[in-house]
Amino acid sequence: MKRGGGLGFSFVIVGIVALGVTSACSDDPPTEPSKKGFWPLDFETELVEVRDCRLSPAEHDGFYIRVFANQEAEMAYLEGQAPLDPGTQLVKGEYDDEDCRVLKRASGMLKLDPNSDPELGDWLWQRADASGNLDSSARARSCAGCHAACEHRDYACTDP
């Protein structure tokens, strides 16, 4: 008995392969990376508070500030250990009110592997609005420049 397929089957296979190739090579722009900060949106409950609400008149535009860390970094931060481990997350909630209830923005530091970005202290620096949308005008070099005065604490300037 002769099996079917022949030329028609070959055209179907070629068509499927061609469709896959043209889809993979489309002119569509690549998917944009996340426009959110590296920290969880609900960082005030998901991370550990390591510094309570205090006014920061000079730094961070005079906001009231609370500092949060991921659980793995809590004790190292509180004890002032340096350098902090890669993967350490420090998030500074910045508030309009003295009770630190009205979040205006957040600034975050994510510790990178050693020698990943020595000019920035091997930290990823980000700032986002209260909804977690990154502020593209925030400059990492500016953050790292001010925090360089706290290099002895691995750029973490706020005392617990």
Image: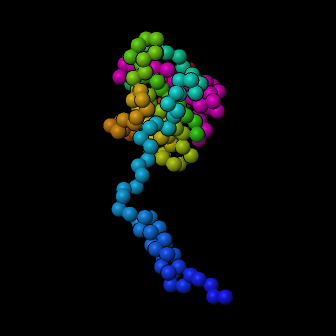
Q: Position of residue 5 (x, y in %)?
A: 56, 81
Q: Furthest residue to the front?
A: 1
* Residue 97 locus on image (x, y percent): 41, 13
Residue 78 figure quarter: top right
> How many labels, in total?
0
Is any part of residue 11 visible from this angle? yes
Q: Is residue 152 visible?
A: no
Q: Is residue 130 left or right of residue 77?
A: left
Question: Residue 68 magenta-drawn?
Answer: yes
Q: Quadrant of the N terminus?
A: bottom right
Which stretch is magenta? Answer: 61-86
Quarter-of-image position of residue 47: top right
Residue 22, position as x, y percentages in the image: 41, 68
The structure residue drawn at horizontal position 56% and vertical position 46%, both measured from the top left corner, is: 114
Image point (36%, 56%), residue name: 29
Of 67 and 8, nearer the camera is: 8
Q: Note whether 139 is above or below 16 in the view shown.
A: above
Question: Which of 121 and 75 lies nearest the eye of the viewer?
Answer: 75
Q: Name the quadrant containing residue 27.
A: bottom left
63 or 156: which is nearer to us? 63
Question: What coloring was used for the rendering?
Answer: rainbow
Please give the name of the residue rendered at 44% of the width and 47% of the height, measured from the top-left corner: 33
Please name whichever residue, 81 or 12, is drawn nearer the observer in this view of the structure. 12
The image position of residue 58, as x and y in percent, is 37, 20
Furthest residue toward right: 1
Looking at this rendering, what residue extends furthest in the top direction? Answer: 98
Q: Is residue 62 magenta?
A: yes
Which residue sits furthest bottom? Answer: 1
Q: Is residue 6 left or right of residue 138?
A: right
Residue at 47% in and 67% down: 20
125 up-or-down from 21: above or below? above
From the viewer's perspective, is 88 left or right of 33?
Answer: right
